[in-house]
Amino acid sequence: MVAGYRSVKDLDWPLMIVTLALCGLGVLQIFSATVGTKWSDAWWKQILWIVSGLVMMWIASMIDYHALLERVSYFYIGAVVLLIVTATLGSKVFGSTRWIKIAGFTLQTSEFVKIVLILVVARYLTDAKMSSGSSLTWKDLGRLGVLVAIPMVLVMKQPDLGTSLTYIPILVCGVLMAGMKWKNLAVIAAVVLVSLPIGYHFLKPYQKDRLASFVSPDRDPKGTGFQVIQSRIAVGNGGMWGRGAKESSQTHLGFLPVPHTDFIFSSFAEEHGFVGIVIALVLYFLLIMQVVQNAQTSTDKAGLYICMGVAALLLFHVLVNVGMVVGRMPVTGIPLPLMSSGGSNTWSIFLMLGLVNGVRLRRFVN
């Protein structure tokens, strides 16, 4: 059950250093963005989540991921049950029932479902490829699609469209890595394009408003378009070198409603400018590439699928969040990994990185 390694040097230290660098930027920005506000204690809470997350990452890296894959059906059932319990007994905040109290902690259960789905996709694709040895069949795609769709629908019902959408890159990346015929891919793309207008009618009113404000934020500048407009102003205010904490008007005059969570990148851009943005994005690039490097050196397909699932998820988070704050993506409430304030997302990311480290450590087992 426990993965062995030859020395401490076998751990992925570049991955850990980049991770901590991003966490450090996040803590500093949370502190700066919340000074003198009701969230002024958010920065030290984030430190606690990071420290405990490091412990979780260490534990996850010590567990043989093959043992997790053997028990993944139990994890999946537990995840679905947990989502149902959250929907019935969870705490309702801002109109959404996403959180549940467990052992004194308020957790967003949908964040941890991401880890389970990464393992589910890895286990299913490994078994499918071992049995067929060729491209995935329609039956494989259908079964795997249903496995991902069940928790996705439950999360949508909370309602939390943003988090539910993060499950899609896990599935898409796994299917593409396993191999799929181009004609099948073309059929799926056509079905998705046709389904988009239909799916629009099932969105909640506030979700439709967000899409409308994305297309034309100026149509309601004091309402649905307010966040996007103010976020773009904040990014533009940063210029080349940033305005610093004392001169960041959008952040400290309350124009960014929650500058330490989903819109932390807007606040960061205003205070640190284009140079700061480049540094942060380079760190994210290095983090994702390091995860991909572990996928390339994995000793088996299961490890490959796990690492690439984590890489796809991280990339999706970064692209959507950064695109959101500059007005190139709709506002979806997807946090920026390792920088946005929040315990559940921070812990889930550290657990995923622990899985990646576990894949790496299996290379050194005799």
Image (cartoon, rainbow, N blue to C red):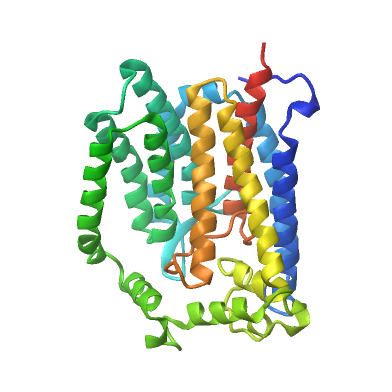
The N terminus lies in quadrant:
top right
> Residue at coordinates 53% horizontally, 41% vertically from top-left?
310
> Residue at coordinates 74% horizontally, 49% vertically from top-left?
20
Where is residue 268? Give x, y as percent: 67, 70
Quadrant position of residue 163: bottom left
The C terminus lies in quadrant:
top right
| Vertical relation: 211 (above or below) 197 | below
> Residue at coordinates 33% horizontally, 16% vertically from top-left?
131
Residue 144 visible (yes or no): yes
Quadrant position of residue 351: top right
Q: Describe residue 125's horizontal placement relative to residue 366 as left or right.
A: left
| Vertical relation: 342 (above or below) 29 | above
Task: Tell which residue pokes out farthest to the top in this image.
Answer: 366
Number of numbered callouts drawn: 0
> Residue at coordinates 71% horizontally, 54% vertically from top-left?
23
Q: Describe residue 317's horizontal placement relative to residue 19 as left or right.
A: left
